[in-house]
Image (tube, helix red, strand yellow):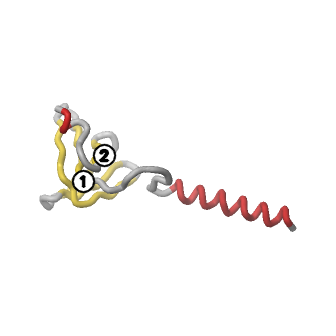
């Protein structure tokens, strides 16, 4: 009986670990409160925009800009920034 209970507990713990790491959440330290997005273009131009909200998918990110527009950004073309942009604020 003890082996059955132990096996059930291990199965529950493993299932919870898979569920929690399978979603778009950081279990450890980190933030999901972003205020800016730094965009990298194919011709080398870069610019930061203030955002009101964002939604991430497997192939990119949709951001709603504070000025009312919205953008779909593919993976590798953007950096979400929580406070100061490490690229724009150090130029």
Query: Which residue: 33% across, 40% down?
Result: 76
Q: How many marks?
A: 2
Rendered location of residue 44, percent (x, y): 19, 31
Q: Is residue 63 left or right of residue 16?
A: left
Q: Is residue 15 left or right of residue 61?
A: right
Rendered location of residue 43, percent (x, y): 18, 32
Question: Between 32 and 76, which is closer to the camera in this rendering?
Answer: 32
Query: Which residue: 18% across, 44% down?
Result: 48
In the displayed structure, 20 sits above or below 39; it is: below
Q: Helix or strand or loop: what does disc 1 sit on?
A: loop
Per the model, the C-alpha gap separating discs 2 and 1 is 19 Å
In the displayed structure, 42 sits above or below 79; it is: above
Rendered location of residue 56, percent (x, y): 35, 54
Residue highlighted by disc 1: 35
Rendered location of residue 7, percent (x, y): 78, 61
The mark closer to the camera, 2 or 1, is 1
- Residue extending farthest to the right is 1
Question: Between 28 and 80, which is closer to the camera in this rendering?
Answer: 28
Assess disc 2: are there few (<14), some (14-19) or many (≥20) residues with their C-alpha within 10 Å of its C-alpha: some
Residue highlighted by disc 2: 74
Cβ atoms under marks 2 and 1 closer than 8 Å? no
Q: Helix or strand or loop: what does disc 2 sit on?
A: strand
In the displayed structure, 41 sits above or below 2; it is: above
Image-quadrant location for residue 47: top left
Q: Quadrant of the N terminus?
A: bottom right
Q: Where residue 83 is drawn, which disc sits there?
A: none
Image-quadrant location for residue 42: top left
Q: Quadrant of the C terminus?
A: top left
Q: Is residue 78 left or right of residue 57?
A: left
Assess disc 1: are there few (<14), some (14-19) or many (≥20) residues with their C-alpha within 10 Å of its C-alpha: some
Q: Earlier in the sequence, mark 2 or mark 1?
A: 1
Query: Which residue: 29% across, 43% down?
Result: 79
């Amino acid at each position: 009986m003890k082996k059955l209970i132990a096996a059930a507990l291990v199965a529950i713990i493993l299932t919870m670990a898979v569920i929690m790491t399978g979603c778009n959440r950081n279990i450890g330290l980190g933030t999901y409160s972003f205020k800016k997005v730094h965009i990298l273009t194919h011709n080398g131009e870069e610019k930061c925009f203030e955002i009101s909200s964002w939604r991430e998918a497997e192939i990119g990110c949709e951001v709603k800009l504070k000025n009312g527009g919205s953008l779909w950004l593919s993976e590798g073309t953007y950096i979400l920034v929580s406070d100061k942009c490490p690229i724009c604020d150090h130029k």
